[in-house]
Image (tube, rainbow, N blue to C red):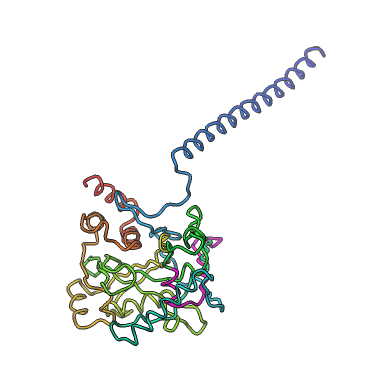
Amino acid sequence: MSGIDVGNGVLGAILGVVFATLFQQWTQDVWFRIRRRSAGVVRSLTYREGAGRAWSTFSLGPLHTSALVVEGDGDRAIAPESVHVRVGAEEIELPADMAGWRAEIEAEESRAETAGDRAPVWNGARYAVEGLETTRTPLDEQPEVHLRLRPTDYYTFLAAQQLDRRMPDGSTPRSRYLDTERPLEAPAFLQCSFAVNIAVVTADHLLAVSRRGDRVRSAPGLWNSSVNEGLARNIDATALGAPDLHAVARRGMREEMALEPHEYTLALLAFVLDVERRQWSAHFYARLKDMTGDQLQSRMSRGVADRWEHQTVEYVPFRSADVTRYLLRPDRIHRWAPLAPALFHLALVHVHGRASVERAEAQAVRRL
């Protein structure tokens, strides 16, 4: 082989490598341009269709609520040691434009006590929510919840619940302090409520559903969770100062259903915010080990500490289709406390699995 042939061969090989490299770069550029254009189309369609928000409140077919599930999907329980609660020392104070509202409430309750025409509302020591942040553990990505609370009282809560009352400048607490696009951002004085809500299921697979009493100040007469218990500073503060949410749930089970801890298992499923009323909740699932629905009803007939909070308890088969139909009943669909439907859905997911629950819910909605 001549030197010219060898040179031509080497030159051809080099040109071939260069051409292949250039062609590869060109095809990659074309591919990424196509992807960018496609992504742009998807983004613009998403924006035009109004699906740009990363959050929405809980809904099920025609049932729409103001409950925003902030953490938890029902599938995995949140471990007690993964919940970190801190209580600040400084008590909540209302802004000057709202402080008079609390004074009005205090004066009216003092008048009622003096006149004796009705029982006064007790100004219990409560907690306000200053913030809730969630993280994940580095290895197994389990949820870590950091809840920051501040001291407050019930009269402050009642004053802060007047979210649509006009202030001197014509604004309302809702319009002045809240942004619908940022539902988790709110001043602590508007969030003077944190409760536990529990879905209780008996040993014979019945979900207990309670109807709130007409005498309660919050959501009277509405259908609600099996157990609803607000945090109380004078009862729930521990030696470290901060309340233990599982202990609060156990207190609620004892006071509202006369159940003791050895009679059930307890799982924390989620943290949920009622964005309309700025009320927070820890959602729990409780399964009775041996007690049936009839036995629970019989137990409660012999005395419950907080009987006045519930006027009715009904029992629903704890199957996805049955619970969904119950939630969507014409005489129920507009009579739910805002946080209850999300609780029952999460409890179903915890027991039956998401795919099975959502399939049954979809079928029940189609049959309406």
110 lies above or below 65: below
Residue lying furthest right? 3
Of residues 40 and 312, which is closer to you in this image? Answer: 312
309 lies above or below 62: below
Residue drawn at the location 25% of the way across and 81% of the way down: 304
Instruction: Specify the quadrant of the image occupied by residue 297.
Output: bottom left
Residue 11 drawn at (x, y percent): 77, 18
Instruction: Specify the quadrant of the image occupied by residue 301.
Output: bottom left
Report the span colored magenta: 136-160
Position of 226 with respect to 69 (left or right) is left
Residue drawn at the location 52% of the way across and 32% of the way down: 38
351 lies above or below 251: above
> Is 140 covered by the magenta stretch?
yes
> Is 280 covered by the magenta stretch?
no
50 lies above or below 232: above
Residue drawn at the location 22% of the way across and 79% of the way down: 300
Of residues 54 and 1, which is closer to you in this image? Answer: 54
Residue 209 drawn at (x, y percent): 25, 66
Of residues 346 and 7, which is closer to you in this image? Answer: 346
Count of numbered tags: 0
Residue 308 drawn at (x, y percent): 26, 78
Position of 167 with respect to 22 (left or right) is left
Residue drawn at the location 52% of the way across and 82% of the way down: 240
Quarter holding the N terminus is top right
Residue 185 drawn at (x, y percent): 52, 60
